[in-house]
Image (cartoon, rainbow, N blue to C red):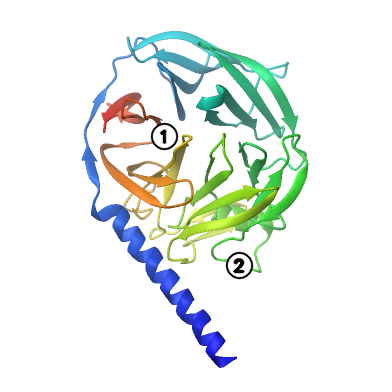
């Protein structure tokens, strides 16, 4: 019994050590990448998400009752504004979350307030509603894998809920990296919220915590989840939740945005404390690249801080939302 306990302790220590060494590795051999502004011919207001598809860049930027601006990256011309806001068929409203399956030509849009998860076929520069699913629990975000949907809280049980493609709950999985038993579901979720992304044409998903260095990778098979890889020190989030989230000045800002392709998971990492980041909760320069099984591949340090980004793997380009002279702009980084 004592021997078995000792072995378990050693394995835990080794796992923690491996995670810390891996985080050092993310930053130790990082490639610096310079960017150049894209001179676009359309007004960009407050963009918060980019999606790269073929020669197009979909910019999530509500304007004139439309949700997205379509930019042709060959000419840097705005060619359309699409995805009508409203409550009709195919329309969207409220806070939105976006993800893409480029191999299936699908764009996924989750509407937080209504719990509706829409799947659109991408036809040229336009979107056509292919499927709409209502998730009664109304998670904070939902992404798609090949055979399931994955949602994050706040939930009473589990960090993730797994749904079938009709929106029915199949099971729950995971736990928060620092479980405060006295906290309610909302407090636990907001303290440990993060950026969720998935391999839409496969069976993997990942989440990087916003206010710690926790990063974990999962596999879904036959409706069951398996934790593949977990990084981070497991330190408690230095913040408190009292109806709203209040960060301490020394709270670590972790993963601020994510982007998924069929081959890789990309995570934007800050690494600054709240006060070092001028008390802003977003923005970062470091992009870590992982295989979907969680193995680290490479990392980039961008010349400018970005809010969100998209990846053109074929041409080796990172598109990022930056601030230029106080206004939002799009920058292109050639890797």
Please, is residue 40 above or below residue 47 in the view?
above
State which tag comes first along the sequence, 2 or 1: 2
Q: Residue at (70%, 48%) from the top-left corner?
A: 223
Q: Nearer the viewer, mark 2 or mark 1?
A: 1
Please, is residue 22 above or below residue 153 in the view?
below
Q: Residue at (38%, 53%) from the top-left corner?
A: 274
Please, is residue 87 above or below residue 256 in the view?
above
- Label 1, residues with CA under 10 Å away: few <14, some 14-19, many ≥20: many
Given the current orientation, which residue lies at the most extreme front position?
222
Q: How many marks?
A: 2
Q: Position of residue 31 (x, y in %)?
A: 23, 43
Q: Which residue is mark 1?
A: 308
Q: Is residue 206 visible?
A: yes
Q: Position of residue 154 (x, y in %)?
A: 66, 50
Judging depth in this view, the residue of 51 and 38 nearest the camera is 51
Q: Secondary structure at mark 1?
A: loop
Q: Is residue 280 visible?
A: no
Judging depth in this view, the residue of 51 and 221 nearest the camera is 221
Q: Quadrant of residue 331?
A: top left
Picture disc at residue 159 = none
Quadrant of the image for the N terminus? bottom right
Q: Position of residue 122 (x, y in %)?
A: 56, 17
Q: Quadrant of residue 156?
A: bottom right
Picture disc at residue 180 = 2
Q: Position of residue 60 (x, y in %)?
A: 49, 24
- Label 2, residues with CA under 10 Å away: few <14, some 14-19, many ≥20: few
Q: CA distance from mark 2 to mark 1?
A: 30 Å
């Amino acid at each position: 019994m004592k021997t078995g306990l000792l072995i378990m302790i050693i394995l835990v220590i080794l796992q923690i050590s491996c995670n810390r060494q891996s985080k050092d590795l993310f930053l130790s051999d990082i490639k610096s990448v310079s960017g150049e502004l894209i001179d676009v011919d359309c007004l960009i207001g407050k963009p918060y998400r980019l999606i790269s598809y073929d020669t197009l860049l979909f910019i999530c930027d509500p304007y004139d009752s439309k949700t997205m601006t379509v930019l042709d990256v060959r000419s840097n011309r705005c060619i359309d504004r699409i995805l009508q806001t409203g409550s009709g068929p195919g329309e969207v409203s409220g806070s939105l979350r976006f993800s893409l399956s480029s191999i299936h030509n699908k764009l996924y849009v989750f509407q937080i307030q209504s719990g509706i998860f829409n799947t659109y076929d991408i036809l040229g520069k336009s979107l056509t509603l292919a499927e709409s699913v209502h998730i009664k629990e109304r998670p904070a975000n939902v992404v798609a894998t090949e055979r399931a949907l994955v949602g994050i809280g706040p939930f009473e049980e589990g960090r993730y809920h797994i749904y079938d493609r009709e929106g029915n709950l199949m099971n729950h999985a995971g736990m928060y990296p620092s479980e405060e038993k006295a906290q309610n579901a909302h407090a636990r979720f907001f303290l440990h919220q993060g950026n969720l992304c998935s391999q839409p044409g496969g069976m993997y998903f990942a989440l990087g915590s916003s206010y710690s260095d926790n990063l974990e990778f999962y596999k879904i098979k036959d409706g069951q989840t398996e934790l593949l890889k977990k990084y981070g020190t497991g330190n408690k989030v230095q913040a408190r939740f009292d109806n709203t989230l209040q960060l301490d000045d020394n709270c670590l800002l972790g993963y601020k945005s994510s982007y998924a392709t069929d081959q890789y998971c990309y995570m934007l990492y800050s690494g600054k404390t709240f006060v070092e980041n001028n008390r802003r909760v977003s923005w970062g320069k470091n992009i870590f690249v992982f295989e979907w099984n969680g193995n680290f591949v490479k990392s980039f340090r961008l010349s400018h801080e970005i809010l969100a980004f998209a990846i053109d793997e074929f041409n080796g380009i990172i598109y990022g939302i930056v601030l230029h002279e106080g206004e939002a702009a799009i920058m292109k980084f050639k890797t």
